[in-house]
């Protein structure tokens, strides 16, 4: 009887071990989006070898490029899912817009590392960067942000708004019309207006807006929201709709859209 008990215990232990092994082998890619993710690193940065090794340990396939022309070629032929700009500078904005305009840019996530300062961060976000991290930073934070960028789908960003004669937002074409007049907005201001338009009449604090616009893929700093609101109000003023955007003192901001 003792032998039967031992045999039964070993039998269940073997099956449990098989199950755990199967779980780790099959489900790892769902647990960590970096697993098998093609990752392109562009530019110069301290301790780049350590970062490359850390990405490999996370299961990613990192590749390095130091020439801007080579980046376009790698994006076209290798089609990476993540682009890490190791040393952001405003001069990169035009190149990044061109890289994202191609067919490979639709699903490409961009993480930029650079100096502190709102101007640098805003320029990066305007150019299409999804997250901006400042030096010095830890590899652990960088890996966590990279995983967050690769996780999840479009969510609210793919939702259109259609109010005839009042407001129309086409997120796929990245175009907005207010009272039949098309507005020219940067990527950053477009996302802000789009989110507020999906929640008309609802008041959001700067912290809430920053949180929702970041949503794990794009990082927005809370202290930049007031500047974004100011710029959006200026654009709406040109369309005679600046009264739509209301500052609720002590609470935050809300968008009041007139009824059709």
Image (cartoon, rainbow, N blue to C red):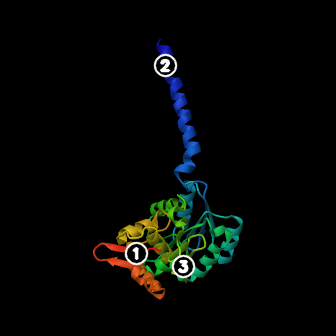
Could you tell me which secondary element the residue under label 1 belongs to?
loop
Q: Earlier in the sequence, mark 1 or mark 3?
A: 3
Could you tell me which secondary element the residue under label 3 belongs to?
strand
User: Residue 55, located in which quarter of the rendered image?
Assistant: bottom right
| Residue topped by disc 2 | 6
Count of numbered marks: 3
How far apart are labels 1 and 3 at the CA level?
16 Å
Residue at (54%, 29%) from the top-left corner? 14
Q: Is residue 112 above or below residue 62?
A: below
How far apart are labels 1 and 2 at the CA level?
71 Å
Residue at (40%, 79%) from the top-left corner? 245
Name the residue furthest left. 250
| Residue topped by disc 3 | 177
Contact flag, marks 2 and 3 (Cβ < 8 Å): no
Q: Where does residue 33 sit, x and y in percent of width and height? A: 55, 55
Q: Nearer the viewer, mark 1 or mark 2?
A: 1
The reply to whether residue 165 is in sight is yes
Q: Earlier in the sequence, mark 1 or mark 2?
A: 2
Q: Where does residue 121 sit, x and y in percent of width and height? A: 47, 77
Viewed as shown, does residue 69 lie left or right of 12?
A: right
| Residue topped by disc 1 | 256
Q: Earlier in the sequence, mark 2 or mark 3?
A: 2
Name the residue furthest front. 260
Contact flag, marks 1 and 2 (Cβ < 8 Å): no
Q: Where does residue 114 sit, x and y in percent of width and height? A: 49, 75
Name the residue furthest bottom. 238
């Amino acid at each position: 009887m003792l032998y039967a008990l031992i045999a039964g215990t070993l039998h269940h232990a073997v099956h449990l071990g098989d199950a755990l092994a199967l779980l780790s082998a099959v489900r790892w890619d769902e647990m960590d989006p970096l697993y098998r993710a093609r990752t392109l690193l562009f530019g110069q940065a301290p301790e780049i070898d350590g970062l490359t090794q850390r990405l490999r340990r996370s299961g990613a396939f990192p590749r390095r490029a130091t020439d801007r022309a080579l980046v376009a070629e790698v994006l076209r032929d290798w089609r990476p899912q993540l682009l890490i700009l190791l040393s952001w500078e405003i001069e990169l904005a035009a190149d990044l817009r061109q890289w994202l305009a191609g067919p490979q840019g639709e699903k490409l996530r961009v993480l930029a590392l650079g100096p502190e300062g709102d101007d640098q961060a805003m320029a990066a976000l305007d150019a299409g960067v999804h997250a901006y991290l400042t030096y010095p930073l830890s590899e652990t934070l960088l890996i966590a942000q990279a995983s967050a960028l690769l996780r999840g789908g479009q969510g609210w960003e793919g939702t259109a708004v259609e109010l005839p004669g009042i407001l129309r937002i086409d997120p796929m074409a990245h175009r907005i019309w207010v009272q039949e007049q098309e507005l020219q907005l940067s990527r950053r201001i477009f996302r802000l207006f789009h989110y507020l338009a999906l929640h008309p009449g609802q008041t959001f604090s700067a912290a809430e807006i920053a949180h929702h616009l970041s949503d794990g893929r794009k990082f927005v700093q809370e202290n930049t929201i007031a500047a974004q609101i100011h710029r959006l109000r200026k654009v709406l003023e040109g369309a005679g709709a600046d009264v739509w955007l209301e500052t609720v003192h002590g609470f935050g901001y809300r968008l009041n859209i007139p009824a059709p």
